[in-house]
Amino acid sequence: MTDTAPQTGQRIDFDVSGMTCAACVRRVERAASKVEGVLSSTVNLATERASIHLSNPTIDRIEAVRKAISDAGYPTRLTTQQSAPSADLGQDSDLIWAMLLS
């Protein structure tokens, strides 16, 4: 887990495929952490999920994280089933989802 700041901001989850070991997990965490606005990243090999805390989860930032992980060699998509902490996005989450899924 990369923890460069307290986990504030909003959590966005991604499905990540192609990971086979702990080194893959670390590569995904590093790729996500390089994106501006990423506060922390946690990747779970068993569930193939990355949880990314963003200071300001704009459409462009979310796409930048997805692209960074994919460019690192791990096909990535925004998780369609968000867990309870992501509900903190409030009304903005509806707009984010509508734009990303269109």
Image (tube, grey):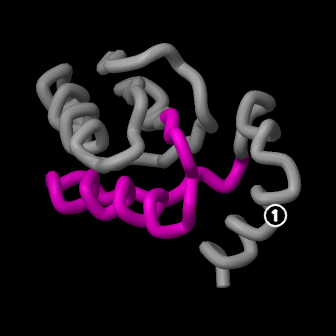
Was residue 85 drawn as part of the magenta stretch in this picture? no
Side (left or right) of 98 relative to 30: right
Side (left or right) of 94 relative to 21: right
Residue found 79% across the figure and 37% down from its top: 88
- Residue segment shown in magenta: 53-81
Of residues 19 and 71, the one drawn nearer to the viewer in this rendering:
71
Circle 1 crowding by C-alpha within 10 Å: few under 14, some 14–19, many from 20: few
Side (left or right) of 75 relative to 84: left
Side (left or right) of 91 relative to 13: right
**Residue holding disc 1:** 94
Was residue 59 drawn as part of the magenta stretch in this picture? yes
Residue 19: x and y, percent? Answer: 25, 38
Relative to 68, residue 43 above or below: above
Residue 55: x and y, percent? Answer: 52, 40
Residue 84: x and y, percent? Answer: 80, 30
Element at label 1: helix
Q: Quadrant of residue 50?
A: top left
Q: How many marks?
A: 1
Residue found 56% across the figure and 48% down from its top: 56
Relative to 58, residue 3 above or below: above
Of residues 78 and 53, the one drawn nearer to the viewer in this rendering:
53
Q: For the N terminus, which image quadrant?
A: top left
Residue found 48% across the figure and 30% down from its top: 47
Specify the amino acid type for callout 1.
Asp
Relative to 1, residue 53 above or below: below
Q: For the C terminus, which image quadrant?
A: bottom right
Residue found 30% across the figure and 20% down from its top: 2
